[in-house]
Image: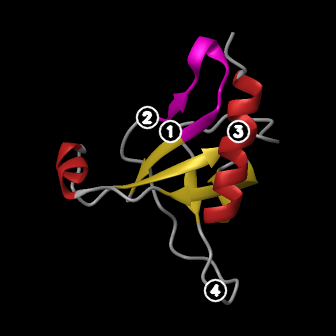
Amino acid sequence: MVDYARARKVADKQIHKWGAKALLRRASGDRVCWAMEAQLSAQEKHALKNFNSRIFLISAVDMDVEPTKEDSLITFKLDGTENSPLRQTAPVAPLAPAGYVVYWELQVE
């Protein structure tokens, strides 16, 4: 039997290691999350709806409210100030084998 809880912990650990704190912003307020930008090959980028899109993996650990299309992703500069909001260009895609969310994938620009 596959241990999806363990898979979520491993994904969370890697996102914390290679990513950073970010915000999911919507009209009702901001939610803190951990996000990591996925590095895509040229072939993978060409497969995207928009070639300029970027893919971020969002940790599912400690997320009370699932991300939705209305969320913008806010990342931070090294000095702690906000970068411009990244709007989503595709629906949120959860990696959810057997309905257990391991992480969410956001396509933004």
Give residue 53's position: percent from left, percent from top: 32, 56
Residue 69's label in the rendered image is 1
Measure the C-alpha gap from mark 3 to mark 2: 16 Å
- What type is the residue that disc 4 sits on? Leu
**In the rendered image, which quarter is residue 95 located in?**
top right
Q: Residue at x 68, y 32 (%)?
A: 7
- Specify few, some or many for label 2: CA neighbours under 10 Å numbering under 14, 14-19, or 20 or more: some
Q: CA distance from mark 2 to mark 1?
A: 6 Å
Of circles 2 and 4, the one toward us is: 4
For marks 4 and 3 on the same chain, the one whose residue lies earlier in the sequence: 3
In the picture shown, does residue 53 fall above or below 99? Answer: below
Residue type at numbered disc 3 = Ala
Residue beneath label 3, please?
Answer: 60
Which label's residue is closer to the chain start, 1 or 3?
Answer: 3
Q: Which residue type does callout 1 highlight?
A: Lys
Residue 19 visible at all: no
Check residue 78 in the rendering and tell me which mark sits there, or answer none.
4
Across and down, in percent, residue 54 comes to 38, 57
Marks 2 and 1: CB-CB under 8 Å?
A: yes
Q: Position of residue 83 (x, y in %)?
A: 55, 76
**First-in-chain label (2 vs 1):** 1
